[in-house]
Amino acid sequence: MCSQKEAVPKVGSEPEKLSEQRPVEEQDKQPKSEKMKPKARRHHNSKSDEPDLQESVFLKKIIIYQRKLLNYFARNFYNMRMLALFVAFAINFILLFYKVSTCSSLVEESEAVHTSRQTARSVQWDPLVGVTDVKKGMSDETGEPLKPVTVRFVLEESSGYMEPMLRILAILHTVISFFCIIGYYCLKVPLVIFKREKEVARKLEFDGLYITEQPSEDDIKGQWDRLVINTQSFPNNYWDKFVKRKVMDKYGEFYGHDRISELLGLDKAALDFSSANKKRKPRKDSSLAAVLNSIDVKYQIWKLGVVFTDNSFLYLAWYMSMSVLGHYNNFFFAAHLLDIAMGFKTLRTILSSVTHNGKQLVLTVGLLAVVVYLYTVVAFNFFRKFYNKSEDGELPDMKCDDMLTCYMFHMYVGVRAGGGIGDQIEDPAGDEYEIYRIIFDITFFFFVIVILLAIIQGLIIDAFGELRDQQEQVKEDMETKCFICGIGNDYFDTVPHGFETHTLQEHNLANYLFFLMYLINKDETEHTGQESYVWKMYQERCWEFFPAGDCFRKQYEDQLN
């Protein structure tokens, strides 16, 4: 009985177990299916993210290679300049083999239409052969038609390699010129912007420009800089990012913060340097509209104005434009030989001697033009008959029958003549105006040739001598005097290697510059007493903390002796 009773629950327990096992199995199957769904989703998302990741990696590689390429152009800027000059010399060497070729041929009737289209102009310009002068449809004295004459510039050489080589060198020169502009933009433009921002920041902080005083109307540079002081990006390259706050702290008590903001056109958000404002992190928005709105348009316009008024950039732009025009006519490449004067310091000094006293030189030339005009008026009224430049038996060639021709004759011939205008016109011997002509010729020679031309030459020569003396004096001072204290080497050379030891260890310029950068980057609240003293003088641009005329060796000279 016991066994039967025990067996009954066993029989009935099997369906229960099966029923219990089924939901468990179903429950086990459900999580597996549910677990499989996220995996499938992740797998699907990973497939969709793979192109984005590949694109981002590809863009990063492009940016890296772009930076490397720009850095390469910047590092090799001067090498590319020398290479461009070498290519220009090679091109101009090939141009020496050009010659003028003149050919005459009868025009056949079958080619009349074709030649009339080509010879419609009296002068044609061929990019490959140069100037073409065509004379057609004219007749001589007998009435017979003249043959069309074509004047061309032909490259005369027997090898046949010069013409293709000239084209290759022209293309190479244009490419190098373009790379020079890119290298200059990467190497020098940041420095140009830094110097300009530094100049504006110093004038704002120390001179109170645009606050206590306004730039004059003639100061185009100052008027243009007004555009940048109220931009959020200013200063961008200059290291002092708190210039606006310093200007507010310095002039705010007297003029008022609102007044300064109104005068400078500054936004209060640009002057808010509070910690609360620093903690605010703007939300990143990668949309195109957000990217365009993030661009400081006024600052970029000001930056373009600074770049396009930079003399070096304008020179490189002119250099490349001449290279491009060289493909139209190869003789434009002759202008690139002037780059040799810009590549060497000695030749740059010679060019600077012309522009050093530029204002005085221009005024003197203007005075020369006025004086020559006065003599032209006298000659036009009284001495016209002496200005006949025709030979015997020819028609009269009067050079002073109209004022413009007379003035140009005096400027072109009279000024260049060693003895003045009297050497270029007829002799007044025996004429009724002989005495007046003598006075006219002598005074022209004295005032124009002896005085004015000598003044012009003297200005150029004196400027060259002054610039050369300045360079030699600076070089001598750097070699014989300490830059910090200004004491000469004769004082330190009483002991072996005294001056060298002093400039490298005691008064090393690099140590002073490092100390100033250390103060700039250090928090003002952490300055020591000496550092606060030097920092205050540095902010006031007072350099009395430099030991001018003093050094430790001089202070302890008695003990050392």
Image (spheres, helix red, strand yellow):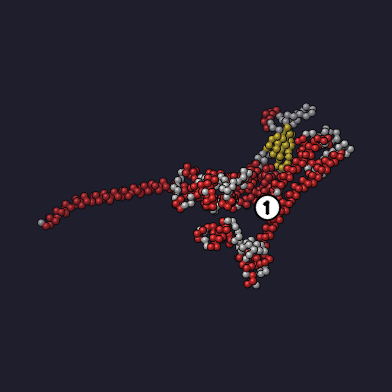
For disc 1, the neighbor class at 10 Å (few under 14, some 14 to 19, many from 20) is: few
For residue 46, side relative to residue 447 (left or right): left
Residue lying furthest top: 143
Q: Residue furthest front?
A: 254
Residue nearer the viewer, 163 or 311: 311
Q: Position of residue 308 (x, y in %)?
A: 60, 45
Which one is in front, 271 or 256? 256
The answer to whether residue 379 is visible is yes
- In the displayed structure image, the side of residue 477 where residue 295 appears, left or right: left
Near-viewer residue (377 or 80): 377
Q: Residue at x 19, y 50 (%)?
A: 15
Q: Secondary structure at mark 1?
A: loop
Residue found 77% across the figure and 48% down from its top? 454
Residue lying farthest to the left in this orientation: 1
Q: Quadrant of the N terminus?
A: bottom left
**Residue bearing mark 1:** 344
- Evaluate whether residue 244 shows in this view: no
Q: Amino acid at mark 1?
A: Phe
Q: How many marks?
A: 1
- Residue 249 is situated, as x and y percent measured from the top left of the image, at 52, 52
Q: Does 438 sit above or below residue 17?
A: above
Residue that appears at 35% across and 49% down: 39
Given residues 219 and 385, the one toward you in this image is 219
Q: Position of residue 290 (x, y in %)?
A: 47, 44
For the C terminus, give its image quadrant. Answer: bottom right
Rendering coords of residue 540 (x, y %):
58, 56
Answer left or right for 452 relative to 169.
right
